[in-house]
Amino acid sequence: GDWSSDVCSSDLMRRDVDGVGSDAFPRRLPMHGIQFDLAYRFDPGAADDGVTLTVPIYALNQVDPARCEWLVPGMLKDKVAALIKSLPQKLRRHVVPAPPYVEAFLARWVPRLEQGLSRPLLDVLIEDLREALQVRAEARDFKLESLPAHLLMNFRLVDEHGASLAISRSLAQLRAAHGGRAQTSFQRALASIASRLPSRSEEHTSELQSPCNLVCRLL
């Protein structure tokens, strides 16, 4: 086979606790001006295995699904390797040996991720395979259902008091179930903040044009 071992979170399992808080395993993920807390559990089979993003209800509609596909730098290697492994043999045989390609992919793209890249991981991988190896893969070639759960972002939705409302690896499902309440909560938070601001302040008027930043800074 193309692989010396199964793709798994073994690298993560060996990492000591000190790794959390590093660039590879940050404690927070910024999106649209909001700092979302991250928690890690490396326990295969556990419901929250991998990385969990805590989402305050008011910020549910501000989560960037494309950014979340990239997880965190310390888990991206396993995810890209798993995606390559899911390709049909006729394409995968052109990505041999796979580990050097995965390392090169990370070297090319993690710096852009840290600069605010927000493109779907699969789109970037398809483009990179074509440019680096002349491998012409399409989205349907990847068997996404074969990815282990820990390689998908886990979302923990919490209310205004920090109590859990729902946990899911599907952001779309959370938005379908709680999007209306999230919008109401966001508007309520924004109205509360706006009422505390000095009237007709030029500085705050410009801030109100970016309500996500305003809520994040003043809540």
Image: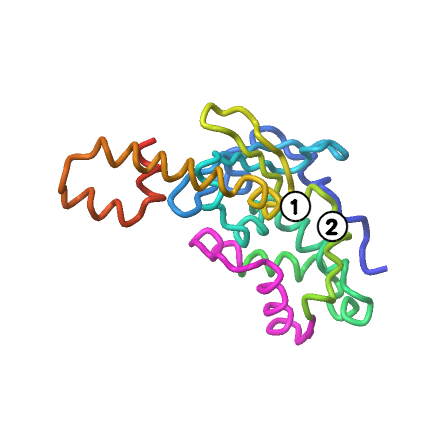
Among the 4 quarters of the image, the one containing residue 96: bottom right
Task: Please tell me which residue lies in front, 178 or 16.
Answer: 178
| C-alpha gap between disc 1 and disc 2 | 8 Å
Q: Which residues are magenta?
A: 109-137
Task: Please name the amino acid that badge 1 sits on.
Answer: Leu
Give the residue drawn at x 75%, y 35%. Answer: 44
Q: Position of residue 56 (x, y in %)?
A: 48, 34
Any mark on residue 147, and which? Answer: 2
Q: Is residue 95 above or below residue 21?
A: below
Label count reads: 2
Label 1: which residue?
A: 152
Q: Which residue is at a point 44% across and 43% down the rendered structure image? A: 30
Mark 1 vs 2: CB contact within 8 A: yes
Q: Residues within 10 Å of mark 1 (few under 14, many from 20)?
A: many
Query: At which x and y percent is residue 76?
Result: 61, 49
Instruction: Specify the quadrant that holds the N terminus.
Output: bottom right
In the rendered structure, find residue 86 and report the number of the disc placed on it. Answer: none
At label 2, which amino acid type do we have? Answer: Leu
